[in-house]
Image (spheres, helix red, strand yellow):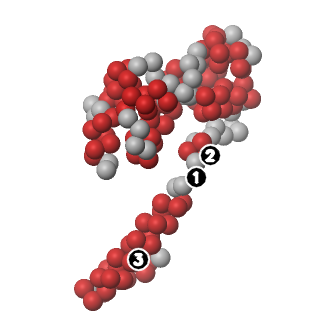
Amino acid sequence: MLTFFVHLMESGDEHDFEIAACFHELLGRLFESTRLPLEVRSAPSDKYPPEIQATLTLIHNHYSEKITIQRLSREASLSSYHFSRLFKKHTGESPHQYLLTHRLKQAKRMLLETNLTVEQISTQCGFSSSTHFIKAFASENAGTTPGKFRKVHF
């Protein structure tokens, strides 16, 4: 498909309609290939120990809820201290940072795929307030607020 598209582009103006059709087909295929639910695409892999796997699954399935280190460490059947060390060793992030990053990924997806307000997205992603959400989002996106992000991408 891509080779055909390049060939049409090099052929000249008489193929404008075919180029546009090919481009739309290419975009359609790209869109379809990314339509897996985000939970499937970002589900934790089996490369983690069972204790960490269980907590990653909990985060991915319950990110909208209040999730504490105590809850995660209970899920892993470890003390908070040992859980935090093991989690960071295997993921490269603290449990808090991992949860925040996951919530922000979900928020970004919702900003692009829904008409929910910033406040609704904030609540659905588990942030304690829309102010906290906006600050966290801007901090991770070069100062761009959720509202500006949505405007730029629509």
**Lower sequence index among marks 2 and 3:** 3
Q: Residue at x 43, y 66 (%)?
A: 27
Q: Residue at x 41, y 19 (%)?
A: 129
Badge 3 local density, few (<14 within 10 Å), some, or many (20+)? some
What whole-number distance in Å separates the C-alpha atoms at marks 1 and 2? 6 Å
Q: Position of residue 102 (x, y in %)?
A: 51, 32
Badge 2 is on which residue? 40
Q: Relative to residue 120, is residue 2 depicted above or below? A: below
Residue at the limit of the structure toward the left, as seen here: 13
Secondary element under disc 3, as helix, strand or loop, is helix
What whole-number distance in Å separates the C-alpha atoms at marks 1 and 3? 23 Å
Residue type pointed to by label 1: Leu
Numbered label attached to residue 36: 1
What whole-number distance in Å separates the C-alpha atoms at marks 2 and 3? 29 Å
**Lower sequence index among marks 1 and 3:** 3
Mark 1 in CB contact with mark 2 (< 8 angstroms) = yes
Q: Relative to residue 138, is residue 34 depicted above or below? A: below
Numbered label attached to residue 22: 3
Q: Quadrant of residue 18?
A: bottom left
Question: Is residue 136 visible from the viewing direction of this image?
Answer: no
Numbered label attached to residue 99: none
Residue type pointed to by label 2: Val
Q: Position of residue 48 (x, y in %)?
A: 68, 33
Badge 1 local density, few (<14 within 10 Å), some, or many (20+)? few
